[in-house]
Amino acid sequence: MNHPTETPQPSAHLSAAYAERAYRRNYRTVMVRFWREHDNAPWRATAIDSNGGAPTHYASVNELFASLWTMLNELNET
């Protein structure tokens, strides 16, 4: 009678650590506040990462989007 060979399973600790790293690579929550000083002023932004840290202020929406894009690409490298 043939028995299938069991695949070794990582310990629960290693599985939890792997799941946490995968979660951080695949999900990110950032709260963004947009404002401008008057109707003709450029939009500005403040971003707060849910992982903590100080708010980051941006003088333009383009700066904000560039920063978010960089953050997402850095997540793929880890």
Image: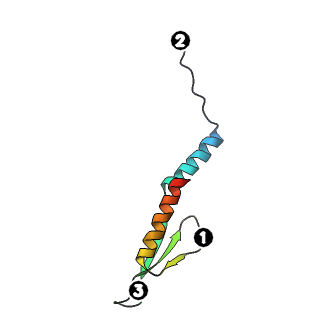
The circle on residue 36 is: 3
N-terminal of the two: label 1 or label 2?
A: 2
Residue placed at 59% from the left, 74% from the top? Answer: 54
Quadrant for residue 3, please give it: top right
In the image, is 77 to the left or to the right of 37?
Answer: right
Find disc 2 in the rendering and name its residue: 2
When the figure is inspected, residue 37 is found, relative to residue 13, above or below; the finding is: below
N-terminal of the two: label 3 or label 2?
A: 2
Instruction: Measure how far apart labels 3 and 2 are at the Cα level.
Output: 72 Å
Instruction: Measure how far apart labels 3 and 1 are at the Cα level.
Output: 24 Å
Identified by mark 3, the residue type is: Arg
Contact (CB < 8 A) between labels 3 and 1?
Answer: no
Badge 2 marks a residue whose secondary structure is: loop
Contact (CB < 8 A) between labels 1 and 2?
Answer: no
Q: Nearer the viewer, residue 66 or 5?
A: 66
The circle on residue 32 is: none
The x and y percentages for residue 64 are: 45, 73
When the figure is inspected, residue 17 is found, relative to residue 32, above or below; the finding is: above
Residue placed at 40% from the left, 82% from the top? Answer: 43
N-terminal of the two: label 3 or label 1?
A: 3
Residue placed at 41% from the left, 75% from the top? Answer: 62
Find disc 1 in the rendering and name its residue: 53
The x and y percentages for residue 55 are: 55, 75
Q: Nearer the viewer, residue 20 or 43?
A: 43
Identified by mark 2, the residue type is: Asn
Identified by mark 1, the residue type is: Gly
Contact (CB < 8 A) between labels 3 and 2?
Answer: no
